[in-house]
Image (cartoon, grey):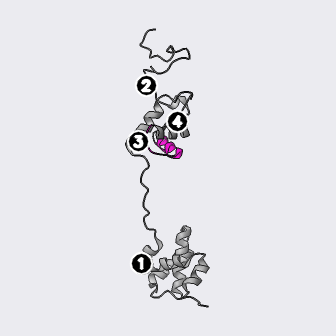
Amino acid sequence: MKTGTRFKGLQLAAEDCAELQRMRRGRAPLTARVWRRVQVLLLLDSGQTVRATAIAVGGYPREISRVGKRYLSGGLQHALGEDARPKPAPKLDSTQQAAVVAMVCGPPPQGRTRWTLRLLAQEAGRRGVVESIGYETIRLVLARHDLKPWREKNVVRSRDRSGVRRQDGRRTLALRPPNQQV
């Protein structure tokens, strides 16, 4: 059975070793990832194999090798730090967001008293605003614009209200702007 290979070329500089020891016993809080990387570098420096180090810190050999290679290529801060992760592209552009907001500010579909997030997601797909969208994305757009369509008092409606009618088809008097006569 193969016992594993030592990580060749990893020799911590004296100041790096002192910094890692200080971090290990220091009072400054460390994230779990940084703590594990500190342990990995110290174990590799002491001559442990990649596999034994992986078992000791509860990681995988590939992760251990990656930390060691990052130290050799960029130093201590590079080995302990994080690479920037790519941000996902926004699901809705500004035009599509404006269309969703306009939809919320308009009257709800026939047979509904107010908009729901799921209804908005379905309607956005039906109207061709987007091909498909989840209701959580709709919720985030509404939160950014401080809209709550499920609460009638938080939705901005036009002053005209020409689309609001009673069951018998006549316009309601209470919803007319104050400057118009009956």
Using a 10 Å C-alpha cutoff, classify the residue at mark 2 as few (fewer than 14 neighbours), some (14 to 19) or many (20 or more).
few
Mark 1 → mark 3, Cα distance in angstroms:
45 Å
Mark 3 → mark 4, Cα distance in angstroms:
18 Å
What residue does disc 1 label? 75
Mark 2 → mark 4, Cα distance in angstroms:
16 Å
The circle drawn on residue 158 is 2
Mark 1 → mark 2, Cα distance in angstroms:
61 Å
Q: Which amino acid does label 4 sit on?
A: Lys
Q: Which-is-in-front pick, marks 1 and 2?
A: 2
Does the stretch in magenta take in 141?
A: yes
Choose the circle earlier in sequence order: 3 or 4.
3
Report the front residue among 4 and 27: 4
Q: Is residue 138 visible?
A: yes
Q: What element carries label 3?
A: helix
Q: What element carries label 4?
A: loop
What residue does disc 4 label? 148
In percent of width and height, residue 34 lies at: 52, 71
Using a 10 Å C-alpha cutoff, classify the residue at mark 1 as few (fewer than 14 neighbours), some (14 to 19) or many (20 or more).
some
Q: Give the range drawn in magenta.
A: 127-144
Q: Which-is-in-front pick, marks 1 and 3?
A: 3
What residue does disc 3 label? 96
Choose the circle earlier in sequence order: 1 or 3.
1
